[in-house]
Amino acid sequence: MNSNIFEQEKKLFLPTYNRIPLEISHGKGVYLYDKNGNKYLDFFAGLAVNALGYAHPKIVEAISGQIAKFGHISNSFITDVQVELAELLIKYSGMSKVFFSNSGTEAVEAALKIIRKKEGPDKKIFSLTNSFHGRTYGAMSLTARSKYKKGFEPLVPNIYQINFNDVSDLESKIDETTAAVFLEFIQGEGGVNVVSDEFASKLFELRDKYHFAVAADEIQVGIGRTGKPFAFNHFNVKPDLIVAAKAIGGGLPLGALLTSPEFDNVFETGKHGTTFGGNPVSCAGGNVVLHEVFENGVLENVAELGKYFIDELEKLSVKFPEDIKDVRGKGFIIGVELFYPGQIIVQKMLEKKILINCTNQNVLRILPPLIITKDEIDYFLFNLEQTLQTK
Ligand SMILES: Cc1ncc(COP(=O)(O)O)c(C=O)c1O
């Protein structure tokens, strides 16, 4: 094998990703280590997957214990770890039933299928402008941002968009022909945009009037990332469907569709399924995440430190009015919108051995592991300030 894996990557892989030029040897807690022994503070957590950081001892124990028993036995069997995770997800989401997939986009596909099956082909399904719901055909058809769809038409029919946070657009488009509205209560890829209280309450008022389904995409923001169990919990509303993924597998692939009682009997046996979905090793990892986040103090950490973090970033925006346009988010999903492309700052932070992500060109997206401490946040803030000063 050629020793330069970056050259090999160019040769071997379809060019779908921009890779960070680090060769990672391992992770521990909130740090990643490269093969040269450098240590990086991770403020994007595998894109919101690694809620408990890297190599969390309880996750290592749970998944190694499970794989030593069986890694896979197919959905012809039900397993204890799947049942435990189903119970936890149902308990903390307030939903009635679950279907496990492998990924976020597949959870969205399951949601689309269950809606179409229940409501028929003619009713309309909506998502919000600037949204991201995944890359398979159904999820991509819901995704509003054209950069993800261009060149892949024709898409799934009868899917339309409502302007983000535009109450009058919402009122003008929703009626008795509506089957569902999909939304991220906090848009992730779209630049960390928070749904307004006014928009959310009008949406649920219309839902009660016309009886369509509200499907909350909690793939990036669920499982405690916003300081509450799910992002919708900030709005005092209850969706009819929830899709979750990312954090729920403890770093392994897993997605979930959670449904309210009206959907209990829509999928009869054989109408939907997957070979790997609900993999027992992923479920074993996910059980640790849900116990730690909801029962062992992690959620409280996010709520408290998330507020502190956002307050401090707002202070920074006052200090750097020519750099920072806006700070927004909840808990540990924070967007810092800049007046210029964020990649410059991402690169400078990387030189300081801190990993952050940039989305939508100019929004620094801050997604630390949920176990991050105040000292680490202060270290991040100090370095971001230095970076803005010297850029
Ligand atoms: C809000 C949202 N929905 C759906 C997806 C798709 O999930 P996956 O990449 O697991 O298919 C993502 C992934 O980033 C997401 O953030």
Image (cartoon, rainbow, N blue to C red):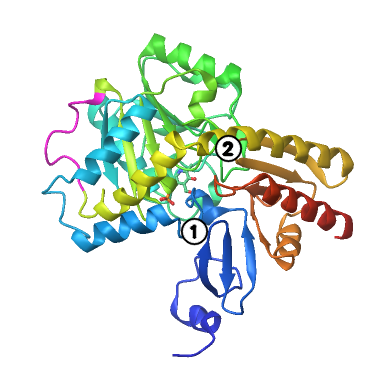
Nearer-the-camera pick, 246 or 63: 63
Q: Can residue 128 be seen?
A: yes
Q: Is residue 337 above or below residue 258?
A: below
Please state the horizontal and vertical placement of residue 92, each as a whole percent of the image. 38, 29
Quarter of the view holding residue 169: top right
| Residue 212 badge | none
Magenta-colored segment: predominant secondary structure? loop
Is label 1 in contact with label 2 (beta carbons under 8 Å)? no
Q: Gap between marks 1 and 2, in whole Å?
A: 18 Å
Residue at x 70% of width, y 39% of height: 309
Query: Which residue is situated farthest in the bottom direction here?
Result: 2
Amino acid beneath label 1: Tyr
Compared across the picture, whether 38 is left or right of 106 comes to right
Q: Quadrant of the N terminus?
A: bottom left
Compared across the picture, whether 194 is left or right of 271 comes to right
Nearer-the-camera pick, 243 or 157: 243
Residue at disc 1, secondary structure:
loop
Residues packed near mark 1 inside 10 Å, few (<14), some (14 to 19) or many (20 plus): many
Q: Can residue 102 be seen?
A: no
Please state the horizontal and vertical placement of residue 386, each as a whole percent of the image. 84, 56
Residue at disc 2, secondary structure:
helix
Q: Is residue 48 above or below residue 347?
A: above
Residue at x 72% of width, y 52% of height: 380
Q: Which residues are magenta?
A: 263-273
Amino acid beneath label 2: Asn
| Residue 301 badge | 2
Quarter of the view holding residue 390: bottom right
Residue at x 54% of width, y 24% of height: 234
| Residue 54 badge | 1
Does the residue tagged 1 have its C-beta within 8 Å of any atom of ligand 1? no
Please state the horizontal and vertical placement of residue 282, each as a whole percent of the image. 32, 53
Q: Is residue 282 above or below residue 131?
A: below
